[in-house]
Image (tube, rainbow, N blue to C red):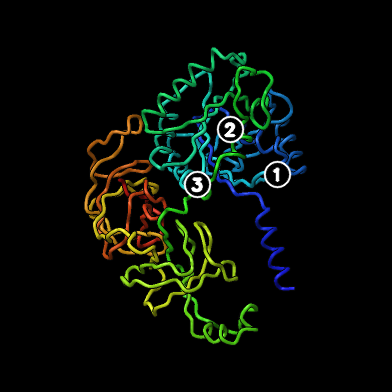
């Protein structure tokens, strides 16, 4: 009976739609909230009572384009609805038959660029919306620059208001060419460019017959088929497990051990290291290195979701047992033997300044890398980026929304590696030691 239940549970988990995270960004008044609202509405992700409320609000505001303002489905704050803009990152959750989605709707104003960084950091894709009548603007370049620096796997540019361009290919093509030129300048290898009308629904959920010259997918169709970051993780990538918790047996035995006296005895004495696999694959019998202990040992057992497994892959939460008694606690890293970079106490990092307080040389901060948190000092502000060109320019401080190079000196060594090679091991947070506020998000340049 137990085996049958386990097999059924495994089948049901396997059959679940995959999770895909994407963020939206765009300049003010380009119709981003309308696009997101239309996407949610046409994919039937809105409850009936919410639809009725939005319909009433649309009528009260005298909405001029029909009886339904799709932007109100995402502008959740009172200030957003009154001003007709997006201020904070709004997270929405919806599903289709093919996939489950987490949508981060990011603000378009320049002063909220930090919010866009927050939304895009964990995204599998970013949808940048532009007004087809205006083309690529300064804020478009800024958003694409942030996407390029964060190495977001998929970049989609939706050229909106194609209805106001008469659904003309000749009006769309120059804008699409400009987008691809800017993306190439920023080092974005592939960009998907779609003609859409958020207001009328063309190429949002279904392909529009009014753009017969466009042979690509609709926006939702594209989002359903692009591989997520977890799916892109190669089994050849080096294994990394930041230890979150050390487990010791407490209470009774797990059901799968109760009938096996030898296994039960081993379980009583075991110690397991739990966490989320950041990258790669680990199998029973693999040789691993434990940082900072510097010990090489062998994986003797793996538990995934409380059940024994032969292997675990990136994004799974696991508990692994080792053949040697290793002194490791929260903040330790277990990695495939011979793959961990040399730990360092000095790092030149790319920082995305998120806090309104300026970051100055000499500031004492905390650096959170994986599950480890260490004290650090801002040794120097090297430069800040011009977000139009991505060029570095001299700087002595970083203000909110700035992106710049900073030298940090750590009190304890960390196994940092380039963000381009490993997003998990190459990123960290800079935290204010007094109030715990996140001051900046950091990446390690190549």
Determine the secondary structure under disc 1: loop
Q: Secondary structure at mark 2?
A: loop
Q: CA distance from mark 3 to mark 1?
A: 21 Å
Q: Horizontally, is 337 left or right of 129 in the view?
A: left
Residue 181, position as x, y percentages in the image: 41, 24
Callout 1: 10 Å neighbours few (<14), some, many (20+)? few
Q: 414 above or below 102?
A: below
Q: Earlier in the sequence, mark 2 or mark 3?
A: 2
Instruction: Mark 2: give few (<14), some (14-19) or many (20+) Cα within 10 Å.
Output: some
Foreground tag (3 vs 1): 3
Q: Which residue is mark 3?
A: 232
Q: Looking at the picture, tell me which residue is in the foreground, 443 or 278.
A: 278
- Residue contact at pointers 2 and 3, CB within 8 angstroms: no
Q: Quadrant of residue 46?
A: top right
Dot 2 or dot 1: first in sequence order is 2
Q: Earlier in the sequence, mark 3 or mark 1?
A: 1
Q: Residue, x 51% and y 17% (percent of image)?
A: 173
The Cα atoms of the two marked residues, 2 and 1, are separated by 32 Å
Q: Position of residue 75 (x, y in %)?
A: 60, 39
Q: Quadrant of the C terminus?
A: top left
Q: Position of residue 54 (x, y in %)?
A: 71, 37
Q: Nearer the viewer, mark 2 or mark 1?
A: 1
**The quadrant where residue 330 appears:** bottom left
User: Tag 3, which secondary structure?
Assistant: helix
Give yes or no for contact between labels 2 and 1 (Cβ–Cβ under 8 Å): no
**Residue at the front extreme, as displayed:** 285
Q: Residue at x 66, y 45 (%)?
A: 94
Q: Is residue 411 above or below residue 57?
A: below
Question: Relative to residue 273, is residue 11 drawn left or right?
Answer: right
Q: Which residue is mark 1?
A: 97
Residue occupied by mark 2: 84
Of tags 2 and 3, the one toward the viewer is 3
């Amino acid at each position: 009976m137990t085996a049958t239940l386990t097999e059924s549970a495994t089948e049901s988990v396997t059959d679940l739609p995959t999770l895909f995270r994407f963020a939206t960004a765009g300049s003010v008044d380009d119709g981003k909230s309308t696009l997101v609202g239309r996407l949610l509405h046409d994919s039937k992700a809105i409850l009936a009572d919410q639809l009725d409320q939005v319909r009433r609000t649309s009528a009260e505001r005298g909405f001029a384009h029909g009886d339904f303002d799709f932007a109100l489905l995402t502008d959740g704050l009172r200030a957003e609805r009154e001003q007709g803009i997006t201020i904070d990152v709004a997270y929405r959750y919806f599903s289709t038959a093919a996939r489950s989605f987490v949508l981060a709707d990011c603000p378009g104003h320049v002063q909220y660029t930090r919010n866009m960084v927050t939304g895009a950091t964990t995204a599998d894709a970013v949808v940048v919306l532009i007004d087809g009548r205006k083309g690529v603007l300064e804020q478009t370049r800024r958003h694409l620059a942030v996407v390029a620096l964060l190495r977001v796997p998929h970049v989609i540019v939706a050229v909106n208001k194609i209805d106001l361009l008469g659904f003309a290919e000749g009006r769309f093509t120059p804008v699409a060419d400009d987008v691809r030129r800017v993306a190439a300048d920023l080092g974005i290898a592939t960009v998907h460019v779609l003609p859409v009308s958020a207001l009328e629904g063309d190429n949002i959920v279904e392909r529009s017959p009014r753009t017969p010259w466009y042979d690509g997918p609709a926006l939702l169709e594209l989002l359903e088929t692009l591989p997520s970051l977890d799916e892109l993780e190669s089994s050849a990538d080096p294994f990394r497990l930041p230890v979150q918790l050390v487990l010791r047996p407490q209470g009774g035995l797990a059901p799968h051990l109760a009938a096996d006296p030898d296994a039960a005895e081993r379980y009583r004495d075991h110690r397991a290291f739990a966490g989320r696999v950041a990258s790669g694959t680990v199998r029973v019998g693999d040789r691993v290195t434990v940082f900072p202990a510097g010990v090489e040992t062998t994986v003797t057992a793996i538990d995934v979701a409380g059940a024994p497994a032969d292997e675990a892959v990136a994004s799974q939460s696991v508990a692994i047992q080792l053949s040697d008694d290793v002194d490791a606690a929260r903040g330790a890293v277990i990695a495939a033997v011979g793959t961990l970079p040399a730990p360092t106490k000095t790092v030149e990092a790319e920082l995305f300044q998120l806090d309104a307080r300026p970051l100055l040389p000499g500031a004492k901060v905390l650096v959170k890398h994986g599950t480890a948190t260490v004290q650090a000092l801002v040794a120097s502000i090297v430069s800040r980026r011009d977000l139009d060109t991505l060029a570095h320019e001299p700087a002595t401080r970083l203000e909110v929304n700035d992106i710049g190079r900073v030298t940090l000196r750590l009190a304890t060594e960390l196994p940092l590696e380039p963000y381009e090679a490993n997003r998990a091991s190459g990123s960290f947070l800079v935290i204010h030691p007094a109030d715990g506020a996140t001051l900046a998000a950091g990446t390690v340049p190549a």
